[in-house]
Amino acid sequence: MLRPRVYISSAFFDLELVRDEVDRLVRSLGYEAVHDERRHTADPTDAARDPSTYSDIDGCDIVVGIVGGRYSMKPQPGDGEAFAQQALQRCVENDMSAYFFVQRDVLTEHEIYKINHDRDIQYRYAGHRKIHEFIESIYRRSKSNPITPFDSATDITNSLRRQWSGLFQRLLRGRARAPEQREMADVAATATTLREAAENLNKERRQTDDALRALLLLNHPAFEAFAAATGAGSRVFFTSRDELNRWLADLGYEGSFRFDEEAVAGWEHKTRGTIELRKQIFNDLGQLEVIPEDHWQDGWVVRVDPRTDTDEVRNDDNLAF
């Protein structure tokens, strides 16, 4: 049966007993404890770590980091970064669950370090400045994994018991809510499907409406009405007021203000009289509105002969010579 693998990282000289207590806790819970087998090296600050240790970290599920007043060994001679710090970086990169514990006196002294960050001073509880730099890197790189102070190994084991018990409880509750969560996921998926179907339907409807509009515009009754009024022998087609004005201008008609009060627009020809539009067939943007043929009325587009318009004749007779 698979079981969680817990990597325990610490400086060996000053924290070996604490490490042993955590090791016993991990094994008592049925987990597998993983650590450097060379823990009994006489002088760990001078020893070089086996590169396989890093692969051990990669194969773990949880990291427990314990920081005291002694700085950990370096992975290779001449390397400026401590092993514990590289282990932390490995943990962050692999997005592992990590629990960090720092001796209370060292963690309290860390506040002094932050105030005197750029000053070279000697610290009482941390044997090396790099310990505070390491703690700072934990805060910086692992924001989701808080640091817990400890005075004894019991503080660490009790904290781990509480946190892992809470983790197990959340797992059980998550399993209990799994059917409900699956049902909610199904509802969300159904809602997404319905929304996509509605969007596709609206898109198809718009496409159908556009096709129908194009068909109705192609056979707009205004084309035949203006062709009859002007006597044009060619096919008439326009989609806007500007296009109609240009077509009439080609026939010799100019926009006129001398038209009947019932008309909304008029175009005057020097010899053919005036064409009046007595129904607004353009929208506010000047585009031709769709009007079905059965809604069209013959009196909407008319041609007025000035010789038969009594009002125009009367106005001409009253002109002074």
Image: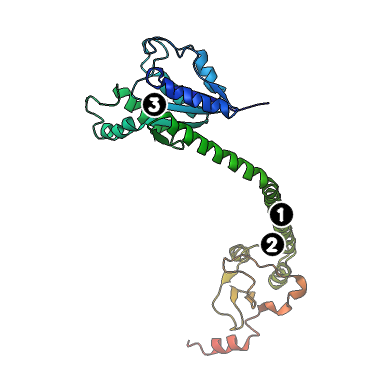
| Kind of element beneath mark 3 | strand
Q: Are marks 2 and 1 in contact (CB under 8 Å)?
A: no
Left or right side of 157 for 244: right
Task: In the rendered view, tell whether residue 286 sits above or below residue 168.
Answer: below
Q: State which mark lies toward you, 1 or 3.
A: 3
Amino acid type, callout 2: Phe
Count of numbered tags: 3
Compute the Cα span from label 1 to label 3: 55 Å
Q: Are marks 1 and 3 in contact (CB under 8 Å)?
A: no
Q: Position of residue 215 (x, y in %)?
A: 75, 60
Q: State which mark lies toward you, 3 or 2.
A: 3
Q: Which residue is mark 1?
A: 194
Q: Earlier in the sequence, mark 1 or mark 3?
A: 3
Q: Which residue is mark 2?
A: 237
Residue name at image x 61 percent, y 79 percent:
263
Task: In the rendered view, tell whether residue 168 sits above or below residue 65.
Answer: below
Q: Quadrant of residue 146?
A: top left
Amino acid type, callout 3: Val
Q: Earlier in the sequence, mark 3 or mark 2?
A: 3
Q: Which residue is mark 3?
A: 67
